[in-house]
Image: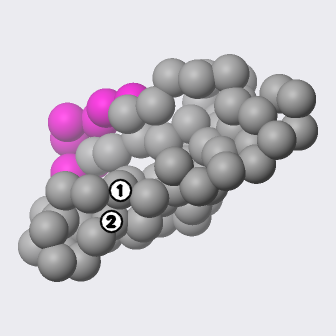
């Protein structure tokens, strides 16, 4: 399942959460679907990526660990 998308300020890339790997992780892709990349690779569930609208490079996300801990990364 793909969910919680966010666009970079220039509108050229999309960041989103996907369970393609078996658990929710963060991915990025160009708007046309090319250059698909998995950004995170942790045992935690990572969702709701938000790109800093000023820099276009800084990323904030919500992380829920296997021990049920939660944090903002």
Compared to residue 20, the image places residue 24 above or below, namely below
- In the image, the segment drawn in magenta is 30-38
Q: Are marks 2 and 1 in contact (CB under 8 Å)?
A: yes
Q: Position of residue 15 (x, y in %)?
A: 38, 55
- The residue tagged 2 is 51
Q: Look at 82% across and 41% down and name the residue there.
A: 69
Question: Going 29% across and 35% down the picture, which residue do you hit?
Answer: 36
Pointer 2 or 1: first along the chain: 2
Residue 55 painted magenta: no
Residue 68 or residue 46, whichever sits in front? 68
Q: Give left or right: position of 73 versus 12.
A: right
* Colour setting: one colour
The residue that mark 1 highlights is: 59
Residue at the extreme right = 68
Real-space Cα separation, disc 2 to disc 1, in angstroms: 5 Å
What is the number of the mark on residue 20?
none
Q: Position of residue 52 (x, y in %)?
A: 28, 70
User: Of helix, strand and loop, which mostly describes the magenta segment?
Assistant: loop
């Amino acid at each position: 399942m793909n969910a919680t998308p966010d666009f970079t300020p220039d509108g050229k890339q999309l960041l989103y959460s996907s369970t393609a790997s078996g658990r929710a992780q963060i991915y990025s892709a160009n708007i046309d679907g090319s250059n698909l990349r998995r950004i995170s690779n942790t045992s935690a569930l990572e969702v709701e990526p938000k790109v800093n609208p000023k820099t276009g490079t800084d990323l904030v996300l919500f992380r829920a660990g296997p021990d049920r801990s939660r944090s903002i990364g």
